[in-house]
């Protein structure tokens, strides 16, 4: 379960990035669509902003996964000294 | 007779030699129905895409008198909005897709195997460096990075595109390879090889890797489907330059020119979609019979 859980965390992070393809096909005005427009018009500051949002989401999702590891599998809990 | 072939297993420590003759290979390949169908599909598409362009016109002229025609005897799949025959475009357009898919999968599998097995086998500092590099690459959304890169560079070179997709898609496979090697290197025959001082490259290449052959082939096929998906996606979004002919470009043009809304030209947008789906399906189904060829224990009698 644990490897799957870390995969889930990565996937959950990318949710914020959106799916560029799907958003383009259905003209869904999400963050992926905005990114595509930014790439097409060479709007670098918008691109940077979107990358920042995606990065924060991925980092937070991974942090949440790391914190939840200990709950899922007590053996993983790192001992911070004498137990 | 077939039962005695390829009975060597991981436990006995000899490298797996599943098939001895091409007749047996063929028999094993055709043993599972799904695998046979997949194999046939892939062979058909690859043959048509590689040999077909030799018999067709390279670049089709624009014909304004035959725009958006319905399928007929002269144009089997109809014509596009520039009056070009869709069937000929389909035959011409497969080559790039297959080459990019194959090259990208080859590059990513090679990186994953070499780095993954070295990380697991050597361990310590090498392991932690490679694993943290993998984690970094893994958290980069590939299609987003490809989109940005294509805005900066002119990706009209097939090999360059394949290389880009290849060097972005190895992390998941590397993790899997590393996990496999970690468990395989504890086996007795690896210890025996270490005692004989056979050297890292020989132990990895001759003792460990053949035992994961089926796993690697399977992941190669999956890598190929992913690479094709990414490449077609890039063309569909219009991020790669629309020069030449391939299924992704056809899809993009059919979509942007509204071919989906005209009953006459529906085949124009459907044919690349169906061709790509069939190729992907064939590849995935083919892995099943390849798995049986390389892993004798999976064979059903």
Image: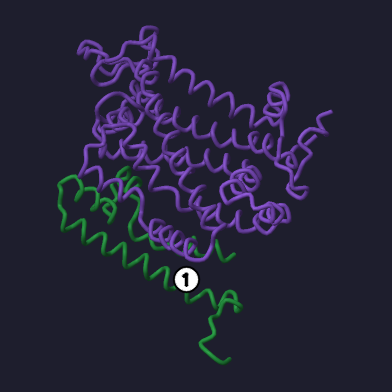
- The quadrant of the image that shows the N terminus of chain B is top right
Q: Which residue is mark 1?
A: A65
Residue drawn at x 66%, y 55% as measured from the top left = B194
The x and y percentages for residue B102 are 45, 33
Residue drawn at x 28%, y 32% as measured from the top left = B157
Colour chain A is painted in: green
- The quadrant of the image that shows the C terminus of chain B is top right
Q: Is B261 displayed left or right of B285 in the figure?
A: left
User: Is B5 located above or below residue A56 in the figure?
Assistant: above
The x and y percentages for residue B282 are 55, 31
Colour chain B is painted in: purple
The x and y percentages for residue B142 are 36, 50
Q: Secondary structure at mark 1?
A: helix
Of B120 and B248, the residue lying toward us: B120
| Quarter where residue B51 is shown | top left
| Quarter where residue A21 is shown | top left
**From this viewpoint, which residue is outermost toward the bottom?**
A82
């Amino acid at each position: 379960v644990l490897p799957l859980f870390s995969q889930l965390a990565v996937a959950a992070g990318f949710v914020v990035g959106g799916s560029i393809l799907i958003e383009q096909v259905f003209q869904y005005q999400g963050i992926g669509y905005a990114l595509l427009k930014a790439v097409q018009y060479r709007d670098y500051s918008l691109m940077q902003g979107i990358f920042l949002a995606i990065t924060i989401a991925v980092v937070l999702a991974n942090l949440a996964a790391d914190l939840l590891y200990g709950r899922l599998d007590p053996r993983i809990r790192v001992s911070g000294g004498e137990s | 007779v077939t039962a005695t072939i390829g009975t060597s297993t991981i436990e006995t420590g000899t490298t797996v030699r599943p098939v001895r003759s091409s007749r047996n290979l063929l028999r094993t390949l055709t043993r599972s129905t799904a695998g046979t169908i997949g194999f046939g599909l892939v062979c058909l598409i690859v043959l048509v895409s590689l040999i077909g362009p030799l018999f067709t016109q390279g670049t089709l002229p624009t014909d304004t008198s035959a725009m958006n025609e319905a399928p007929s005897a002269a144009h089997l799949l109809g014509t596009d909005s520039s009056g070009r025959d869709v069937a000929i475009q389909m035959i011409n357009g497969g080559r790039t897709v297959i080459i990019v898919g194959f090259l990208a999968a080859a590059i990513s599998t090679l990186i994953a195997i070499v780095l993954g097995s070295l990380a697991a086998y050597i361990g310590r500092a090498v392991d932690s460096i490679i694993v943290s590099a993998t984690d970094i690459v893994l958290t980069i959304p590939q299609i987003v990075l490809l989109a940005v890169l294509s805005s900066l560079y002119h990706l009209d070179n097939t090999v360059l595109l394949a290389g880009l997709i290849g060097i972005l898609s190895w992390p998941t496979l590397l993790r899997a390879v590393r996990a496999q090697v970690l468990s395989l290197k504890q086996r007795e025959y690896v210890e025996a090889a270490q005692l004989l001082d056979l050297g890292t490259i020989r132990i990895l290449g001759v003792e460990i890797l053949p035992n994961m052959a089926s796993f690697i082939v399977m992941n190669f096929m999956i890598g190929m489907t992913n690479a094709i998906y990414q490449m077609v996606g890039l063309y569909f979004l219009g991020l790669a330059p629309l020069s030449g002919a391939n299924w992704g470009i056809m899809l993009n043009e059919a979509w942007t020119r509204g071919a989906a809304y005209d009953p006459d030209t529906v085949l124009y947008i459907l044919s690349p979609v169906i061709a790509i789906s069939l190729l992907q399906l064939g590849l995935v189904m083919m892995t099943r019979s390849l798995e049986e060829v390389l892993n004798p224990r999976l064979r059903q009698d």
